[in-house]
Image: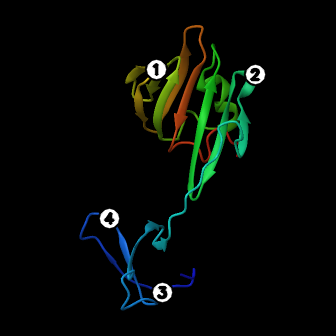
């Protein structure tokens, strides 16, 4: 199949998107699994990267950790390493240039502990094995003397990236 195949329609009968291709109207492969991104059907492709070889590394202020960034297809994700004493308002705010973190984070805590405090005062502590969602508008800090390591699949594209 060429990348110039024309998309005829999207079928959702099984709960998964399938694209009907005009190039193969009578074949057994006229409906192929597809990924829909920004209104364009794209064929999925297997990819892998090693955690040891990020596409980019963004250090935090004062050596208090870093964000290793990985891009696969149209998805950007990262492994954040936050050293004891790290606090967003001290070590990322000067890079971001905003009053609070404006990224929405979804991921898992791999080690260590972190507290997140929302602009409205709501606060939650996370630890190893916790799966999290942290909406925009928060500060955060490492709890205790152990570094905190997280894997974030949504809030990475612009996080700790100089504006």
Residue matched to label 1: 128
Q: Residue at x 59, y 39 (%)?
A: 78
Where is residue 39 drawn, in percent x and y? 45, 72
**Element under disc 1:** loop
Can I make out residue 162 in this image? Answer: no
Front-most of residues 29 and 94: 29
Q: Earlier in the sequence, mark 3 or mark 2?
A: 3
Label 3: few (<14), some (14–19) or many (≥20) C-alpha neighbours in 10 Å: some
Q: Is residue 84 left or right of residue 125?
A: right
All told, the count of numbered labels is: 4
Q: Earlier in the sequence, mark 3 or mark 1?
A: 3
| Residue lying at the far top of the rendered structure | 145
Where is residue 70 drawn, in percent x and y? 63, 46
Q: Residue at x 39, y 21 (%)?
A: 124
Q: Using the numbered discs, state the Cα–Cα distance from disc 3 to disc 2 in whole angstroms.
A: 52 Å
Where is residue 95 drawn, in percent x and y? 70, 36
| Nearer mark to the viewer, of 3 and 2 | 3
Can I make out residue 52 in this image? Answer: yes
Q: Using the numbered discs, state the Cα–Cα distance from disc 2 to disc 4 in whole angstroms.
A: 46 Å
Q: Earlier in the sequence, mark 4 or mark 3?
A: 3
Residue matched to label 3: 6
Q: Using the numbered discs, state the Cα–Cα distance from disc 2 to disc 1 in whole angstroms.
A: 25 Å
Q: Earlier in the sequence, mark 1 or mark 4?
A: 4
Give the number of the disc on residue 62.
2
17 above or below 161? below
Front-most of residues 59 and 21: 21
**Quadrant hosting residue 125:** top left
Residue matched to label 4: 16
Label 4: few (<14), some (14–19) or many (≥20) C-alpha neighbours in 10 Å: few
Q: Is residue 156 left or right of residue 55?
A: left
Front-most of residues 86 and 75: 75
**Element under disc 2:** helix
């Amino acid at each position: 199949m060429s990348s110039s195949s024309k998309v005829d329609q999207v079928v959702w009968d099984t709960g998964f998107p399938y694209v009907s291709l005009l190039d193969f109207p009578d074949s057994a492969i006229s409906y192929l699994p597809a990924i829909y991104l920004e209104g364009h059907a794209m064929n999925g492709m297997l990819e892998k990267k090693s955690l040891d070889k990020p596409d980019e590394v963004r250090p935090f202020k004062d050596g208090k950790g870093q964000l290793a960034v990985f891009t696969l297809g149209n998805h950007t994700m990262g492994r954040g390493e936050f050293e004891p004493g790290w606090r967003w308002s001290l070590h990322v705010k000067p890079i971001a240039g905003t009053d609070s973190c404006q990224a929405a984070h979804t991921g898992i805590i791999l080690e260590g502990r972190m507290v997140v405090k929302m602009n409205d005062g709501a606060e939650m502590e996370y630890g190893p094995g916790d799966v999290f969602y942290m909406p925009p508008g928060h500060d955060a800090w490492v709890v205790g003397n152990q570094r905190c390591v997280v894997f974030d699949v949504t809030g990475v594209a612009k996080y700790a990236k100089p504006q």
